[in-house]
Image: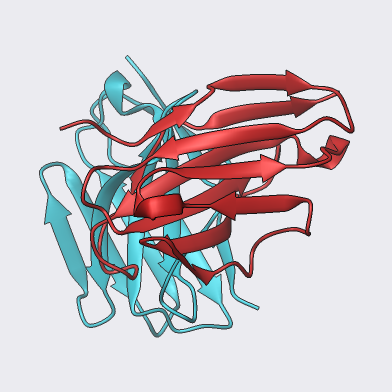
Amino acid sequence: EAGVTQFPSHSVIEKGQTVTLRCDPISGHDNLYWYRRVMGKEIKFLLHFVKESKQDESGMPNNRFLAERTGGTYSTLKVQPAELEDSGVYFCASSSLTGSYTEAFFGQGTRLTVV
Amino acid sequence: SQKIEQNSEALNIQEGKTATLTCNYTNYSPAYLQWYRQDPGRGPVFLLLIRENEKEKRKERLKVTFDTTLKQSLFHITASQPADSATYLCALDNQAGTALIFGKGTTLSVSS
């Protein structure tokens, strides 16, 4: 069974540019999460989808971040325009059930560097 | 707001010894607590989950305890091996029970 896949693995962009990160969850997992780890800090929650619906986007930093999950399959996270403080590792995770009583499967992450 | 502290950023032990990692939390009473392992350049990998009404959970050489009075979880690796070297993350459910709140992690180094 394929795991959670994220593209690209690395991205270096200039301040002001746009970047789109993609996440393919494990097939059949309705729950999809985006997390981010900024250097020196803990992994922080960004948002949660159940199928194509956003259940919780309380962790999204600002309106420069837009997440979508059309059709309830893969998800994209767009940053537009990117700022220096957006640099970090973006993780996607999926799970079959909602809630922390079940394990989450994480992708390898996308390392975003804004210069 | 909820806060998680993993007491040590780094822990160095010798092969064969037991590694004990600590996770403390405040301002919350989580229903579940999870431990993950993260290797460099990889995403976190789930290890164990323990519920608030469970005192202890074991899986092979791993043992997790959950003390809701002390607001603390201990993570033990017995008979540690160099392959156990990694960063270990403690995670709790958020108040909505829909996502995870992570600690910064403890980087364990096991020397042979």
Q: Give the side of residue A78 with respect to residue A6, left or right.
A: right
Residue B95, how many percent across, how many down?
Answer: 49, 81
Determine the residue located farthest toward the front in the rendered image. A71
Residue A46, how many percent across, how many down?
Answer: 59, 57
Q: Residue at x 40, y 43 (%)?
A: A74
Determine the residue located farthest toward the top in the rendered image. B112
Name which quarter of the figure residue A82 lies in.
top right
Q: Chain B drawn in what color?
A: cyan
Q: Give the side of residue B3 with respect to residue B17, left or right.
A: right
In depth, the one of A69 and B84 nearer the eye is A69
The N terminus of chain B, quarter of image? bottom right
Q: How is the image coloured?
A: by chain
Q: Residue at x 32, y 14 (%)?
A: B112
Q: Is A113 situated above or below A104? A: above
Residue B21, how many percent across, how many down?
Answer: 41, 50
Q: Is A10 situated above or below A40? A: above
Q: Looking at the image, can residue A44 be seen? A: no
Q: Looking at the image, can residue A93 be seen? A: yes
In depth, the one of B14 and A97 nearer the eye is A97
Q: Which chain is red?
A: A
Q: Give the side of residue A24 with respect to residue A29, left or right.
A: right
Name which quarter of the figure residue B19 lies in.
top left
Residue A84, how many percent across, how many down?
Answer: 86, 35
Q: Give the side of residue A52 with respect to residue A62, left or right.
A: left
Q: Is B9 situated above or below A100? A: above
Q: Residue at x 77, y 33 (%)?
A: A18
Q: Residue at x 20, y 76 (%)?
A: B54
Count of all numbered marks drawn on residues in the image? 0
